[in-house]
Amino acid sequence: MDTRWKKSKATGSFLAFAAGLTILVIHLVPVVSMVSAFGVDVFEGQTDYQESGDFRILISSRLSDLLGVATGGRTYAGYNLDSTGAAYKYMDESYGAWADKFLNETAEVQEEAVVEESAAYTVATLEDFDGNFDDYQEYLIEQQAHYDESAAEAGYGSMDDYDVYYGYGGGYSGGDQEDRDAYMADMAQNKNLRYAVIYQNKLLYSNIDDFADKAGEEWKGEDFSKSLDAEAYNFTLWYNRAGDGKVQIVKDGYEEDVYGDGVYSDRSRWQVPGYANFTMGESAKDAVVFLAAAKYPQLYLVSEDGRSGTTQYGGRLYRMRWNTLFLASAVERITIFMGIGVFLLAVGLLMRKSRRQAVEWIADLLAKICMEIKLAALLVLTILFMGMGGDVLGQFVWWIRSGLVYYHWSGDYIYEMKRMIEAGGYLALWFWLIYLVVLDWRMNGKRQKKPIFDLLKMKDLKYPVQKRLVRRQRNTLIAEICLLLLFAGAVCALWMIQGELVNWISGGYGYNYAYETDLYEAVAEDMGYPFHMRYAYMLMAEVIFGALFVFTAITAAGLKKNRRLAVDIGMLTDRILAVREGELAGELVLSGGTDLQEAADSLNQIQKGMETALAEQVKSERMKVELVTNVSHDIKTPLTSIISYVELLRQEENLPQHVKEYVQILGEKSERLKNIVQDVFEISKAASGQLPIQMEALDMGKLLRQTLADMNDQISQSTLVMRTVIPETPVTVLADGQRLYRVFQNLLQNALRYSLEGSRVYLALTEEAGQAVVRVKNTSSVELSDGKDFTERFVRGDESRTDGGSGLGLSIARSFTEACGGKLTVETDADLFTVTVRFDRAANAPGRGEDSFVAAGASEPGMTGSRGTTTPEEVESV
Amino acid sequence: MDACVLVVDDDREIVRAIALLLEKEGYRVLKAYDGMEALRILAESEVQLIIMDVMMPKLDGLSAMMKIRERKNLPIIVLSAKTEDTDKILGLSMGADDYVAKPFNPQELAARVKSQLRRYTMLGGIHAQNAEEEIVNGRLCYRLRERTLYADGEPLRLTATETKIMELLMKNRGRIFPAEEIYERVWEEPSFSPENTVMVHIRHIREKIELNPKEPEYIKVVWGIGYKMEKK
């Protein structure tokens, strides 16, 4: 239960962490974009569109237009009209917001520079308020002209078509009556903005229902707002109503303070005439203008005959309102989501321990997937994301760099918002992908499963080292060449697409080329992608290509050089292996002048040193054996005399009794001395590995029984009781029977000699894990000291050395056992003395090559079978 | 018994000890202290057996033996402090009739001298009877009809069981018999723990036929397998 709670806690904490982080990452894009575009004020959640700067700009520009119309000046109005379709709409609708932002920015710069002079700002020159603004206008006009020209040249239909399609009102910008009438006719369709234009007390234009047909009549000071529903048109503006050249604004029944301190600056709310430093020209003093804006603007559409499409009027105010509402609700929603995200993240961060647990589970899960699958998945996901949301980053930068403002008051802002969320989603996906990769890399560094890579590595390891090195380098070269070809292909493709190569191949610079280049330039520049930049990109690509080529060439050259080094390394490693195998003759000679010369020289020296050491060791070993042989020979010769004369003494008949006893003692001791000399000789031979061994398959059980029978007299003479457990079935081992007999003879003699009187000696033969194991256990008569190796030469339980043994029994037993390939160990536990002899079991039945014999099972008399015979194998133990 | 034995060793004390021992047994003994001297004495006197050390000054035992063998066929017993099997084999292959390692048991040496002399002087003259009726193996001879085992031409007193075992082994010289088989074929009943019984009998036989029962030459144990009669 407890673990389950812990489990769900861990899962919960991680989910909270993940969800919170995801929400925050998703909303990062819209929040940054919006704050960047509108400033932090966007979070105030303004819902009244008439409170926006955009609205004020629109109203003041309309006022200037109408004043222009009234006084018979130029209008430039074509771009401020809210008629028609897509392309136009973007330019027009976005302009206001752009200007709004632009104004704010320039205001900050010019804050100190208060315009003191009441310069003659006329309606006609209003558009000149800033050089940049002028440039923008000019750019648009020029572009239009350019398009028209290109289109005409290409034969893409008449100007009228463009006029309809784009809604360009090129004609409006003129200064004659006809233009003004056309402009006003269009403007009248927009019922969101009611107006009345009076000049010298004569009503010129109006789209207020009561006055629409009273153009040319005298204005007797009627209040136009009375003819309008005050609820529906809650914003009214009068210009020069009282003949003072000032603007009067009433909103929701309250008059607004238009002028503030009466001095116009870039910070002023309303950019209208009437300030101390912003007065109207003489002609405008006779004009009166009324404007009213709808509280809830609508779309007014006219489907026109003979023209393709529908003309839209009043869209600008309509979108202005809806976008304001949408922005407000979006801000609200985003704020709520961000709040939730922060809360979840905080919860996840606080439950650190549980979260870490969950992270470990995820890491475990990731570790179970092989590296190759993960890499493939990462590749696929990367390509997928590149395809789907690859432009997210560019788009993000575009949004931040005020690009968003261009969409601000357009109907596409909702769509743009969706795209931002989508972009945020991609960002989140990227984030989590990177998170998982980093997590996997950090937590599962060493325990990655990578069967294919391992297989490749194993395959690689099968090659000798020099081949491995060359292969690795060759792979690098191949990869580089592939990259080079790929890059070359990409550059070629780029050229092809640009059309240059095609033209170049097909014969150069014809008309089409000129036209296309022209068009490219136009389009490229229109897209904010200057034509000359393309050459820069091409140049960059070529530089990269060149660098790649040089790099590949260097690798190729290095490969050739390194091949020689690799061969040397291979020779060096081969030589090291040979030395390890014991081959010490011969010197390593490299191709010379390589980096490895020093290493090779060192190896040669080591080799020489080892050779000398080994030769010395062999020599000293031989000398040791020779010494023992000579010494034992020198001992044996006088011993022979001693034994012989003792014998002669023994044969003397007239000796007194006590002398006969002396002679007896002399005889026994000389006999013992003889045995010791014999033992020392044998053990020194066994230790130096010069003991001849004749291996054969034999039955360990039988050998033990034979040994016991052979020693029967000694055993029965002792006070000890022999307890033996020897299986009847043969236990076959491979050993030298004569030596093994000596082993057990020594062990039993040892037991007989050093056991407590009247105690039992246990001899058992068992099979353990494919081994024949003989154990001799006896109770020691003297106290055994711990930590003594009884198989060492001249070590015995009784330190006094007065017993009959040579102190070599166990040592010989161990030497002989090991010479036969077995293992002898001694254990003591209190007074219990246990010797264990182990031999690997042999498959063959006992047998001896030269002599035929009948195996134990074949009991038929006279049968001379040769079952189970083996050829004798003579093994010189090393 | 006035057989003459030549004892050759550079160690005068050993020569003297051997001479004393053999003289007590009733042999006439000549002494030499190197190979050259031995050859000279051999040329001058009638000698029936030589006991000779291997390592001697002037002329070593093996070279002297080769020279002797060029002209004479008398038995030679080699003495040596070298106990390597290879030394033994080398000595025997170069013409020695027996090989005794130093330090030796004096009584064993006397027994070997007696055995060699008996075979040289007596058996050499006795004509072999019907080949089918006797089995000869080195010092041993088993007469089938008599059911008697002879060692150095002298009949041995074996019990009935011992004779049966010897007949089996003499008939199958060189073959290894597991204890079970010996038991079943001699006692003619199934064996139960035959190792001890067989071993006891073999030990008794060895005491009768071997010169040194502790280092048997004829009946050998093949450890872990069985027993066999060595082929001589």
Image (cartoon, rainbow, N blue to C red):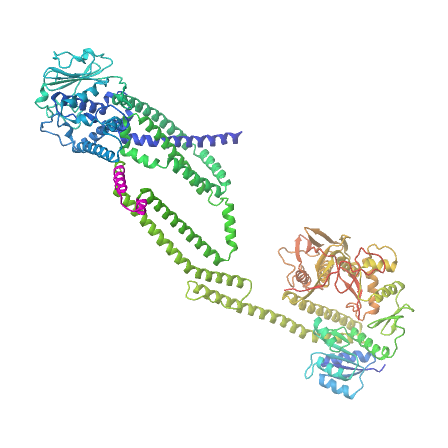
Q: B91 or A521: which is nearer to us? A: A521
Q: Above or below — where is A392 with respect to A837?
A: above
Q: Above or below — where is B34 with respect to A113?
A: below
Residue A87's spot in the image, x, y percent? 27, 29
Residue at 92%, 69% in the rendered image = B146
Q: Above or below — where is A247 with respect to A110?
A: above
State the residue lying farthest toward the right.
B145
Q: A577 or A645: which is nearer to us? A: A577
Residue at 30%, 36% in the rendered image = A397
The image quadrant that residue B153 belongs to is: bottom right
In the image, residue B227 lies in the stretch drawn in magenta: no
Residue A797's spot in the image, x, y percent? 67, 59
The image quadrant that residue B27 belongs to is: bottom right
**Magenta stretch: dominant SS?**
helix
Q: A810 or A364: which is nearer to us? A: A364
Residue A279's spot in the image, x, y percent? 10, 24
In the image, B20: left or right of B156?
Answer: left
Q: A838 or B186: which is nearer to us? A: B186
- Quarter that holds the N terminus of chain A: top right
In the image, A707: left or right of A510?
Answer: right
Marks counted in the figure total 0
Please say whether residue A260 is visible from this viewpoint: no
The image quadrant that residue A246 belongs to is: top left
Residue B123's spot in the image, x, y percent? 86, 77
Magenta span of residues = A500-524
Please say whether residue A266 is visible from this viewpoint: yes
- Quarter that holds the C terminus of chain A: bottom right
In the image, residue A511 lies in the stretch drawn in magenta: yes
State the residue lying farthest toward the bottom.
B44
